Amino acid sequence: MTNFPIQVILVYEKAFWEPNRDMFGLLNEAEQQASLNPEDYTLRRGRYYLFWNCIKTSGKPTLIALMAGDAAHYAEATSDNQLIQEVTDRLDKMFAPNDVPLPTEAIVTRWSKDPFARGSYSYVGPQTQAGDYDVMARPHGPLHFAGEATCGTHPATVHGAYLSGLRVAAEVVEGMIGPIKVSTPLVEKKIKLEQHTTYPPFGSTHMVEPEMKRESKNARLIEEEDYEASIIGEILIKIGERPIKPGRAGVNPFLLYTKDYWYICKAECDEKQRASSRDPNAKASKTEIRTALGLKWRTASVEIKQPYLDLTQSAKDDAAAHAATFKERVAAWDAEAARIRREYIQNNPPPDGSEERILNSRTAIELGTGKRLRRL
């Protein structure tokens, strides 16, 4: 089969698109703007026509751009740097006026060069019917068939292949031990056994509390916790959470420089590697690129370094200004929280008459404990 896709996988520091959007598409313009010749549109057909958002599955801001048809053949013969620049330009236009940065990492798949795929890819033919996937999934005697082409609900996907493997495994097990009965419900409801008064063992001087007394203690504890929760809810609704002590700015001039010069330095290192090894496909390792970037930074002129030093200093100044007002903001929040607590107890007295004790108590939210420092 000649219909195979190329994936350009792009990893970013943060998402510039809507994270909840699973996918979005792109209509390509003609080679000559506003052209009426269909051939001018054919040249760019299939280039980055669909983007998959993989932030939910990978845990990182990741996009997969697809290239299909003639665009896949074009991508096979085009360098990674050129493809990354092209897809960045396309995204830049889609999300204008916001600037789209270069990805921190990129992977380009080339299926025709894969010795195990050789460019093959399953797709639905013109005469395909809805039940064809089920036909291919039928077992023949002891032979069972799995793969994305046997999964009608998720064809041409890795998860389709995975689901088909689960189906075949269930078929094999049922063929060996018979149908598997699934109990209803899967998890039985726990039944609390009624406890009676317990007594100490013979010869023991330790007295065991009756179960009734323990239950009354638990009921009082739950009632106190609910009352405290209502006070905290009142505080959070009116003044929000207690201010959190700011952490360090976390900005490094060399890291900012690396973000801008990574692909430029990578291209230079790749060229040196190809020249020294005489291998046209040779590539430099990440360690070599990082070492070269460090040398570039150390030997860079003041004009090149200054913008990154200014950005770092600006972030540090903002963090210092934020920290300077932290004590005043915390003192104001504590005083307001204490006032809200007093008013709530006066308007809603606790049922057990423990106003004084509850008035002087403080929860972890009011004390600001158990929170991690946030970086600016």
Image (cartoon, rainbow, N blue to C red):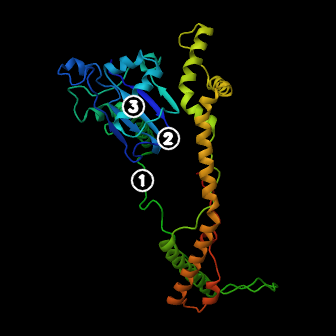
Q: Which mark is residue 58?
A: 2
Q: Residues within 10 Å of mark 1 (few under 14, many from 20)?
A: few
Q: Dot 2 lies on which element?
A: helix
Q: Earlier in the sequence, mark 2 or mark 3?
A: 2
- Residue 167, by quadrant, is top left
Q: CA distance from mark 3 to mark 1?
A: 43 Å
SS class, disc 3: strand
Instruction: Find residue 65 and name its label.
Output: 3
Q: Is residue 137 visible?
A: yes
Task: Give me the residue at 28% from left, 20% from top.
Answer: 31
Q: Residue furthest bottom?
A: 353
Q: Which residue is mark 1?
A: 181
Identify which amino acid the numbered label 2 is placed on: Ser
* Label 2 packing within 10 angstroms: few (<14), some (14-19), many (20+): few
**Label 1 SS:** loop
- In which quadrant of the rendered image does the N terminus lie? top left
Label 2, label 3: how far apart the Cα atoms are: 15 Å
Label for residue 61?
none
Q: Residue 334 at x, y = what percent?
A: 61, 74
The residue closer to the viewer here, 366 or 108, is 366
Percent position (x, y) of residue 19? 42, 46
The residue under the point 63% across, 9% down is 276
